[in-house]
Amino acid sequence: MGLKVLLVDDEADIVEVIQDRLETYGFTVVTAGTGREALHKLSSEIFDGVFLDVRMPEMGGIEVLEAIRKTDRKIPVIIITSSSSREAAIEAIAKGANDYVLKPFEWEELKGKIEKVYAITF
């Protein structure tokens, strides 16, 4: 498949686990630990999609999503957030995210969201 995606989350242990799984699915994964770092990488590299946490210090995922949508309306964005912030995930969909998955999630659920958003099959 060879799709290059940006994984944005401030929790290093979460990043490591999700990155490993995405790479198993065939993605090339670049990571960012903050919203600002994510926007910098998005402005200097080409990505096929973004996996974005909502709750991060300094610049939250909704703010990052809004900045992404100002420059790119088409890049797929999947929100990954805790179940306690379901409202934020729904807000993200309203602001242009393609889908969301609530932590903790089942890998099959994430795989299904990826297949739907990227129109691919594993």
Image (spheres, rainbow, N blue to C red):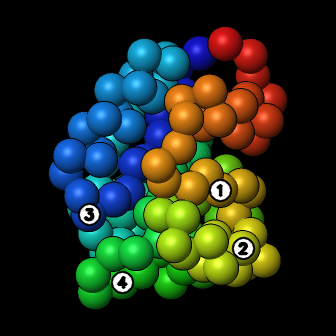
The mark that comes first in sequence, 1 or 3, is 3
Which mark, by number, is residue 59?
Answer: 4
Cβ atoms at labels 2 and 1 below 8 Å apart: yes
> Residue 119 at what x, y percent from top left?
80, 29
Give the distance between the C-alpha atoms of the residues marked 1 and 4, in whole angstroms: 19 Å
Q: Residue at x 42, y 16 (%)?
A: 24
Cβ atoms at labels 3 and 4 below 8 Å apart: no
Residue identified by numbered label 3: 10
Of badges 1 and 4, nearer the viewer stands 1
Which mark, by number, is residue 100?
Answer: 1
Q: For this rendering, which residue is in front, 6 or 86?
A: 86
Is the residue 114 above or below the residue 84 in the image?
Answer: above
Of badges 2 and 4, nearer the viewer stands 2
Give the distance between the C-alpha atoms of the residues marked 2 and 4, in whole angstroms: 18 Å
Q: Residue at x 67, y 51 (%)?
A: 76
How would you rate the neighbour count of disc 4 (Cα within 10 Å): few for under 14, some for 14-19, many for 20 or more? some
The mark that comes first in sequence, 3 or 4, is 3
Residue type at numbered disc 4 = Met
Cβ atoms at labels 1 and 3 below 8 Å apart: no
Q: Quadrant of the C terminus?
A: top right
Which mark, by number, is residue 90?
Answer: 2
